[in-house]
Amino acid sequence: MGRKYACISLFILLLVTASNAQKIDSLQQIKEVNIITYKAMNGIGRMGDEANQIIYSGKKNEVLQIDSMDANKAINNTRQIIGRIPGLNIIETESGGFTANGIGFRGLNPYQSIETNTRQNGYNISADIFGYNEAYYLPPMEAVKEIVFLRGASSLAFGPQIGGMINYELKDGGKKPLEGTFSQTLGSYGMYNSFLSLGGTYKKVQYYGFLQFRFMEGWRQNSQQDQLSGYAGVKYNPTNKLQLGLEYTALRNTIRMPGGLTDSLFKANPQQSLRSRNWLQSPWNIVAGTIQYKMNEQSSISLKSAFLYSQRDLVWRNEDGGPGVKDTITPSLNYIPREVEHEYFRSITNELRFLTHYTLGGTQQTLAVGVRYAYAFLKRQHGAQGTTGSDLDYTTTSGWGGDMNFYNTNVAGFAENTFRIGERFNITPGLRYEYLQSIADGFDENTAGDSKDPYVYANMQKRTRSFLLGGLGLQYRSSAYTNFYANYSQSYHPISYQELTPFGTIARIDPNLKDASADNLDLGYRGSVRNILNFDAGLFYLLYKNRIGTIYKTDTVTYAYRTNTGNSEHKGLETYVELNILGGLIPTKRFGKLSIYNSYAYVDARYVSGDYSGNQVEYAPKQIERVGLNYRISRFSCNLQYSFTASSFGDAANVNYSPDALAGIIPAYHLIDFSASYRLKKGIEFKAGVNNMTDEKYFTLRTTEYPGPGIIPSVGRMFYAGVSANF
């Protein structure tokens, strides 16, 4: 089915391009290229050649304008809001114990977005981008102005991860002294969302802030959650050239986790839960300071410093016994004790960027350079015996089963230069140097079970390494609004804390364990044809090298050995085609504006070396297809979207079925979402919709531990309605 839609999309692209072929405009040289973003039709567009000291020329990128989209923003419905980005694979775990759904591209691991560099206003918001790159906080979509995606070539300007960069740019408050938004949304299964924002500009000061409260009883049993998130930011412009900024972001939440299911339990009733005593809290705090200085008409410099002070606290009946074992009262008329875990995150990241335009050979060129210093600390304590109660209680009745300290230090520098050759052709070479030091200290449980000793000690393991990344981007302007692009870049994924954790007294970690790395290649054609067609069609190739896993070796005894186990190849097609029918192809707007879009990706991701050579990469569906209709007339607008995700495997061994549900196929699924809104003259807007209209029973994750173990079902049919007022 996905291939059929892709063929239709490509046919539309060729047909409309041919029927509206434009004469290639003669371009004149200008002193400065100052395009920040190019908004194309209905909310999706692309970045200009550079913005905010970052070069985008020749790189695969997209921009989503959030306010112009009809979607369920009250619960950050990832599928509706950013699902039209081609190839976006979503792990839907919001109902299972996370505050945010994970995403991944091109067959890379989508779990908690660990292969993606996640940012807000240009700075990191995940726990630790090097050793523990999980995103427990995302801003509410009602506060987001736009989302920028950069794939493949993101590593030169941002460093890890292999899967690219996503940046949530918040609203800035507007130009009036005071502007605000107040919205209330109700939905199925006890969902309630309240959002309030205030912002404005007074003399040389611009400010913006929001508060959001959300509560959900939950689609599944034992899946209640509430969260309070807030943000306050202020920008001061003492001169026309200098801007100083200070921001604070906070999240407070309490989540009840329903646990996982076996295949048979899921088929019988995916809403059931065998766990009623699992709780999670992840208080998040981020303080950021920014300096922007425009030195002259050609040059600018910026500094972003972000301090993250956060944690994850968990009390649960853990994975012992598997997902099919119900957490029941024992013969002694009591529950068994739960397990308590704490993780404390402390990190600081400083990024200095400089961009300048200069003339060479009579043509304007662009140079971007930058340096970064980052330090991160994680303290992980787990395995302590908790209470036998059911409420949220972190009281411990024993010592810790594991108590580890992790430290990461990173120093990096990069340089990229866009050389403009003639009036149409750009070439952008770049280099990035990375220095990384990782330290592990403490003890952990003997999970390998290779001796009677229950613990294994890290004894101050230290790993220091440095490496050089290179890249080259090409861009050819075929007209004022279309271009061909090609890009090759190297990227990496640092050794994670989990991979540094000792796991047995006989088991060993390879002393020469290498960071995973990748070669990325993009080739595509993108742009727009008048107000009729918006498109981006591209091919990609990714070679993922030095994947880390565990093998078994025999010396005097047989032991587990954690090392680099092999490589995988990811190749495929990504296309986005949007056609304006009413108001575009048919010029009249008498009956409103109607557009159709198609986002399609084909991904062939396979292991090419190691024990799993020839197998499909886990969580890498071959086809992801989303087709949508946008309609707007007067003050009414709506969106109808169909989504298809092909089946994939839950593990690298490509197991079809396992009785404990920890491995097996993740079946294909089809979903339909609908959203609508009606705006009154006085800034009041009514909105309503339904997600998963057909009440599809599906899941996107099998897990061996948290938040399971087992299958984590995704949410069924859900209605919502709300009202907002702008003042």
Image (cartoon, rainbow, N blue to C red):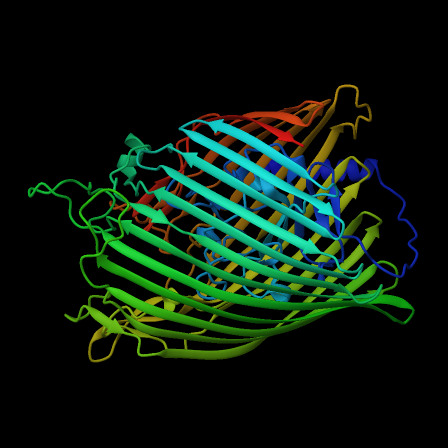
Residue nearest the viewer, comparing 517 with 284? 284
Left or right: 5 in relation to 176? left
Number of marks present in the image shown: 0
Quadrant of image for the N terminus: top right
**Residue 180 horizontal/vertical position (percent):** 64, 37
The answer, for residue 109, to whether it is visible in the render is no
Decide if residue 490 is on the left or right side of residue 568. right
Q: Residue furthest left?
A: 332
Residue at 51 percent across and 34 percent down: it is 194
- For the C terminus, the quadrant is top right
As drawn, the residue found furthest toward the front would be: 203
Q: Residue at x 81, y 54 (%)?
A: 477
636 left or right of 252?
right
Residue 724 lies in what quarter of the image? top right
Residue under the point 59% across and 68% down:
350
Q: Examine the rendering and report whether any part of residue 317 can be seen.
A: yes
Residue projecting furthest to the top: 591
Q: Nearer the viewer, residue 588 or 546?
A: 588
Up the image or down, 418 lies above or below 118; here it is below
Q: Position of residue 597 (x, y in %)?
A: 66, 35
Side of 555 relative to 719 (left or right): left
* Residue 75 spot, x, y in % from top left: 50, 37
The residue under the point 49% across, 33% down is 193
Residue 126: image location, x then y, percent = 49, 57
